[in-house]
Amino acid sequence: MYSRLLRTKPVGSMASGSDDLTELGEGSVAGLAKVLTTVDLVSLGVGSCVGTGMYVVAGLVAKAMAGPGVILSFIIAAVASILSGVCYAEFGVRVPKTTGSAYTYSYVTVGEFVAFFIGWNLILEYLIGTAAGASALSSMFDSLANHSINFFSISLSEDTYPDLLALFIALLVTVIVALGVRNSVVFNNVLNAVNLVVWVFMIIAGLFFLSASNWEGGNFLPYGWSGVMQGAATCFYAFIGFDIIATTGEEAKNPNTSIPYAITASLVTCLTAYVSVSVILTLMVPYDLIDGSAPLMEMFAVHGFLWGKYTVAVGSIAGLTVSLLGSLFPMPRVIYAMSRDGLLFRFLSHVSAFTHTPTVACVVSGCFAALLALLVSLRDLIEMMSIGTLLAYTLVSVCVLLLRYQPDEETDTHQFISGEDEDGLKHHDDGAAPTKDDQILIGGSDADGSASYHAGGTEGEGDDSDFHTGHASLLKRLLGGHFYTLRLRLGLPDASARPTPATGRIVTRSTLLFFLTSFFLWSTVIFGVEQGGGAGAVFSGLTATLMAGSLAKLLITILQQPQSARKLPYMAPCVPFVPAAAILVNSYLMLKLSSLTWARFTIWCFVGEMKHPFSILELQIGRHVVIASWYVTATVAATRI
């Protein structure tokens, strides 16, 4: 049980090959088609973000959480996204043949259980994203019809009705995605072009209706900085595009260059769109008068510019449709990857010979998303989606931090070997020598004799450069002649130092303690300092200071260990600082979400555990890597409730 919980999947078995079609799922006669260019990936990323994020989230956060401070909320959320995005980009290069994004990344890094935990929450992310996109489209059509689209007279709760139109929209887009990746991407690109034109129109037309009084007299931060941070946690939902890009590794023509470039371009484009639209919206309409369901359309209607309203309506249809498509597109691919590895039902890995898509997974996931859109309100969907996204991004940052400090020639004794692989290795019992393909599956070497992921390429090992200790060159530029003095005092490793199993274990322990302590730190700050008072707040402040000191000590401990010399086409900069900052920012934003969101998230995790072949009691035999994920989730959920 210990071996199965912690076994990893060797990257050598997923390396990019020359074939146009990838590994086949069980019962499939075809694989996924490698047809996506860099432009296609950027279009997918931008489309998945800008639609719901620009047309719905900006108005929702401005009205109920941050006021005009929504601008700052988007910037903070973007910083958190960029920190996680560079970690995703590095993983996209390390594991280019990847359908499953963070799920597969964690499978090759920390083990099967954590991989299942992340994959299950990625499904939640995309499921809710699809439902939220359908609900946003339905709300937009309802606004065009003067809020007269109600199919039921009895509400589920206050101001909440079953949304039959959202159900139909989700099912329609499910059919489009199931018809094939090329058709989906062409449709996506056309709608993105329409959305871009309408965005430019909104910025130019909105300049004629601005009023600086909407920001004056304390109106810029009506809910204070706490509202801005709560808004940032919700706005994080609007930056999920790079995660969607990372799920297309098996369908990208050149993932080594396309994925990092597309992630960067998507984040920059989306931040520009969100900030510009938020400025126009909050200067055109007082924050308390913003329409929560269709803010950008109604901001022109308030000023009597109906032609502008209907122009924005066209962009809303295009933007929200492409956002819905961007959320539904990666979900069946994560399900496909998990079912192919045996962690979900095997029949979900079937790939259609006609469309080269995981059709069964498309239909099943689309139907669940449609049902969710029918029954759950848009705001609840957006908040619940943010928590799954933030947790997945946090764990990806943890994985990057772990990988950089592992020894180059490490052999993992708990690697994943599928049933087919086991059959292929049976001949070893007869005394036959292993083949090169067998060596790939057990983490030995690639078919061409080069080192696999676990063996680690050590090109340039004799190079006495600071490449493998990326922080060293940065500190040299910042500190100049004081660098060597600081290096001696902090105990930083020499350029020639290489990681060992012992130093790798030190980094693993330090990283996991950093991960746990960050949650306890922000819990103390939010619930003890911000919401407390008197002696309790003072005690919480002292406790938080001690924990901050512990985090600094853990970071110094990681700095003192040598990094791997393995070079990649793209590597996250300033390791360990960037992954550590991503962990801190993401954990803070997670704790700013509502208690109800945490309760729903916890229920979803327990439902997933019922499917996973290991019970909760069996986790007690696992190491701290396995226990950490569940412990943090349960503790924080209990605190919020």
Image (cartoon, grey):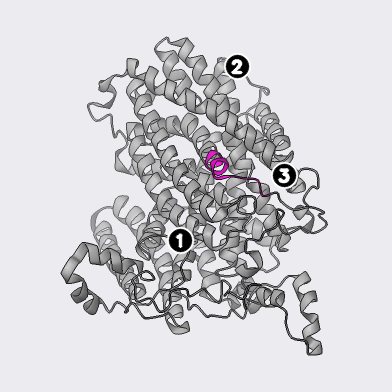
**43 in magenta:** yes
Mark 2 residue element: loop
Instruction: Provide the secondary structure element on which disc 1 rests.
Output: helix
x and y percentages locating residue 292 in the rendered image: 47, 27
Position of residue 543 measured from the top left corner of the image (x, y, whole percent): 29, 65
Which residue does the numbered mark 3 point to in the structure image?
362
Residue 456 visible? The answer is yes
Q: Which residue corresponds to the image point at 74% horizontal and 45% vertical from the top-left? A: 364
Q: Which residue is mark 1?
A: 397
* Left or right side of 192 for 426: right
Mark 3 secondary-structure assignment = helix
- Assess disc 1: are there few (<14), some (14-19) or many (≥20) residues with their C-alpha within 10 Å of its C-alpha: many
Point out the tag, 3 or 1, that comes first from the N-terminus: 3
Q: Which residue is mark 2?
A: 148
Which callout, 1 or 2, points to the residue nearer the camera? 1
Q: Amino acid at mark 1?
A: Ser
Q: Amino acid at mark 3?
A: Cys
Q: Is residue 596 visible?
A: no
Of residues 235 and 311, the one drawn nearer to the viewer in this rendering = 311
Asked if residue 398 is positioned above or below residue 359 in the image, the reply reads below
3D distance between C-alphas at marks 1 and 2: 46 Å
Q: Is residue 90 magenta?
A: no
What is the quadrant of residue 355 in the picture? top right
Locate residue 58, reporting x and y percent: 43, 32
C-alpha gap between disc 3 and disc 2 = 32 Å
Residue 171 pos. (x, y %): 71, 34
Q: Residues within 10 Å of mark 3 (few under 14, many from 20)?
A: many
102 in relation to 148, above or below: below
The kind of residue on which mark 2 rests is: Ser
Residue at 59 percent across and 75 percent down: it is 620
